[in-house]
Image: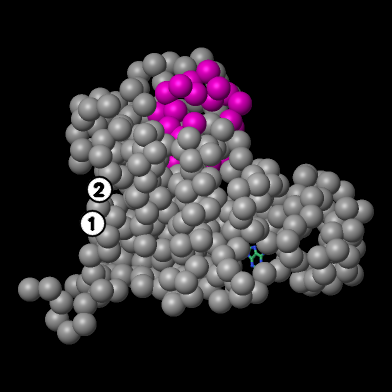
Amino acid sequence: MILPGSTIGILGGGQLGRMLAMSAAYLGYRVHAFAPDADPIIAQVCNRYISADWYDVTALKAFADACDVVTLEFENVPAAPLQPIADKLAPHPRALAIAQDRLAEKRFVEELGGTPAPYHAVESRDALLEGIDRLGTPAILKTRRDGYDGKGQWRIGSREEAEALDFPGTPCVLEGFVTFECEFSVILARRADGAIAFWESAENDHADGILARSTLPGAAIIGEQVGEARRLAQAIADKLGYVGVLTCEFFAGKHGPIFNEMAPRVHNSGHWTIEGAATSQFENHIRAICGLPLGDTRRVAPRVVMENVIGPASATAYEALHDPAAHLHFYGKTDAPEGRKMGHITRLEWPEEGPA
Ligand code: AMP
């Protein structure tokens, strides 16, 4: 067990790391962070910040030596330079290696009995056209690596569009377009001894490929499919010997849950848990990686809605506080270009006046 007072290392400098660092501080841990950026937002809330390249193995090793356990908030940390510090890492970098490659991830999930969207590996324009002929249109071409929030994705409406596409020149995977009733995520926390806790699955609405809103309770179909989705998420976590919070995103399809992707970390669709659950994803991640008992994950209000504050809309987001049910989080970012996640607002809603 890594006791309060010890030092937790976080790889990555964004808002997920910032919220992890704040939960760690509540529990009395010190936090060191490591990322390539000069002045990341995590540096506003941690004890020590190291700015170095992901491939600077000497700096990484020194960082890990100063920490009792190291975790991550960003899944695109290159997995190879992490090998020398793998023993200190939770989750283990093997989870990263799978999650960083959409093709490896789909194959891994299929081996465990899961169903991803129909897909075709694409290394060239010819393979893209082959994939279009096999899967039909519309389809989505996604880079195998480094995509997030809809980046590195091209929607293809016809074979002609595929022929005209400026092919990205990096390994990709073509996905058939899935029709679904809604999207949901399974978020779990797992300890090294295999103990697991799940949060309720939120219904997630996206706009322009970016999460816009998570709502609980979600559509009835989520309740019908969440058991199967949880079994798959648990099988993934067990197979990887996963330690920490793991997120798996699903489409609620006509015939059952369709696996979209996994994130080996806390997730935007779990931000509602800060006020909306008895224990947040951030706190349980810290507890899991430190070997502490996991906290109760139950929802604490009849309805919980989390909305992201994205881009220039952040200028007036404080007005949400006129509603006493609203909790506003800002991530400490100074520039607010279109599409940038600046903060979020969580509302705990009770019928009538709410709790006494
Ligand atoms: P991703 O980055 O892969 O999670 O994609 C971002 C969003 O695009 C998803 O949350 C879906 O709303 C949509 N999307 C991605 N892949 C598919 C697919 N194969 N079929 C339909 N919609 C998709």
Residue 295, label in figure: 2
Q: Is residue 83 magenta?
A: yes
Residue found 21% across the figure and 30% down from its top: 4
Q: Indicate the amino acid at tag 1.
A: Ala
- Please state, as top left, top right, bottom left or bottom right, where the N terminus lies in the image: top left
Q: Is residue 81 left or right of residue 42?
A: right
Which segment is the magenta one?
70-92
Instruction: Tell me how many marks there are.
Output: 2
Would you identify the image quadrant in which residue 275 lies? Answer: bottom left
Q: Position of residue 346 (x, y in %)?
A: 31, 66
Q: Is residue 331 above or below residue 134?
A: above
Which secondary structure, mark 2?
loop
Residue occupying the far right of the picture: 126
> CA separation, marks 1 and 2?
7 Å
Residue 278, label in figure: 1
> Crowdedness of circle 1 by 10 Å Cα count: few (<14), some, many (20+)?
some
Q: Position of residue 330 (x, y in %)?
A: 33, 56
Would you identify the image quadrant in which residue 114 lies? Answer: bottom right
Quadrant field for ligand 1: bottom right
Q: Indicate the amino acid at tag 2.
A: Gly
